[in-house]
Amino acid sequence: MTETSGVSRRGLLGAVAGVTAATAIPAAPAWAADDQRPGALSHPKLDKYDRQIVSGLSSDRALRHLQVLSEDIGPRIGGTSSEKRAADYIADQLDRFGYRTKLEPFPVADKFLAQIEDVRDILPNDLCWQAGAAAGGKLDVTVEGPVRDVGPATAPVWPADVAGSIVIADDTAAARPALVAEAAARGAVGVILLPADLVFPRRASAFAPAGLTDAPIPVIGVAQVQKRLLREALAVVTSLPLRISTKAHRGLTSNNVIGERRGRSGANGPIVMVSGHYDSVIGAPGANDDGSGTVLTMEIARVMSKLNTNATLRFALWGSEEQGLIGSRYHVAQLPQDQRDRYKAVFQNDMVATSWDPAVTYWILSFTGLANTATDAVRASGQRLGYDPQMVGPVLRGSSDHQSFQEVGIASANFSWRGEISPAHLEPPYHSPEDTIVKNVSLERLQVSMELIGTAAYATARL
């Protein structure tokens, strides 16, 4: 039975098979339970319980969920209708697996979004063209015009034919109001602000420009990759007409999705949780961040629904993580102390499938930097699966939903594939329009991540 707080989600998204299948996808791994995994230094030494998990997990099934989230729905900005569509889809799947599922609503801030459309179909269409809109610009409008590049906002070079055009400029916050005012005065119908390039492997994300008041035209902020593609197109065509639309999303509610199945120990017994966050940032389809952690959680939930455990199982997908862990902090704040005391471990999964070659290290991240039940269980699973040499940690790091639990003393950790030098070395598509299945997902890494967390969670919940 499902508890909901709003409109029925039934029928919102049908079976996963409805997703477009034309997109090229990464190859699914095909190893047997006792085969040595790619990158592992030894063959696994699995017990019979590990085999129950490993034999049931399917990266193909997880991929189909990921296609729904990142391709059919796309960017899932906290509190918007796209995030709600994802929440409904996830809850429906957990229902199907037999969990008692609920949506846990909470308020979030207004969002201001934009969409770029290429009138001549010149720009690449294999990445997202969502952007952020300035709250102080014209909202809920659509404008169209040829692009005019005026260079840096601090010293723009204005062409004679600005009237009726969409101006693009290298953004500087201090110069933003004057640039927009001048563009409007010259008759521009919109302004696209371009971010400064970040140092590799970082790339700037799309953004909602601040610091404007009652600008008479829409003003939007794009990502670094969108900036590059716009300028590359302008270098080879005589005209690049675009259509940009802005929309204000106000009075928003985001949701956590939580599925539960009571264990043998009963209503007051221990709890083991597997979790991820299902929202994404502006302009990012969020295939790896954190579509990968979301589908890992869903696939482990499917497999464990058939297994007997002593502990109560909870599978949680957090809303609005990207706005500051809002969903998980809301959830933890609602937990009375006797509920908090029941948690044995929370296994949080954030960015567990990147295809970026340098991301060869599986990081165990603890907000306190100390080991706990969750870190120990995954370490032990890594040893049984032959992956211990690739694992580093626990290392002190927050910035994902494990932090919300560790702040109140609940054993938790975050698990993620990242660069070998530091957990700060995230893949270039991170928070980018290029965070897509094709550009940023490895089904091999996803499968290994599912095996590590699935066997660890089962070992923790079984006894």
Image: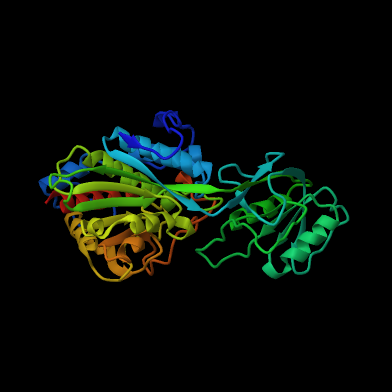
Pick whichever, 252 or 297, lies toward us: 252
Q: Position of residue 420 (x, y in %)?
A: 36, 66
Taking depth in this image into account, of 396 and 251 the one nearest to the observer is 251
| Residue 289 visible somewhere in the drawing | yes
219 horizontally vs 81: left or right: right
Q: Residue at x 73, y 49 (%)?
A: 236
Question: In the image, residue 219 lies at what x, y percent?
Answer: 70, 54
Q: Position of residue 452 (x, y in %)?
A: 24, 53
Q: Is residue 421 above or below residue 344?
A: below
Residue in front for this viewpoint, 324 or 284: 324
Q: In this rendering, would 336 be left or right of 384?
A: right
Here the colouring is rainbow
Residue positioned 45% across, 59% down in the render: 427
Which quadrant would residue 66 be assigned to in this image?
Answer: top left
Q: Height in image: 275 above or below 59?
A: below
Residue 285 visible in image: no
* Residue drawn 39% across the image and 64% down it: 419
Give the position of the N terminus as an image quadrant: top left
Q: Is residue 125 left or right of residue 421?
A: right
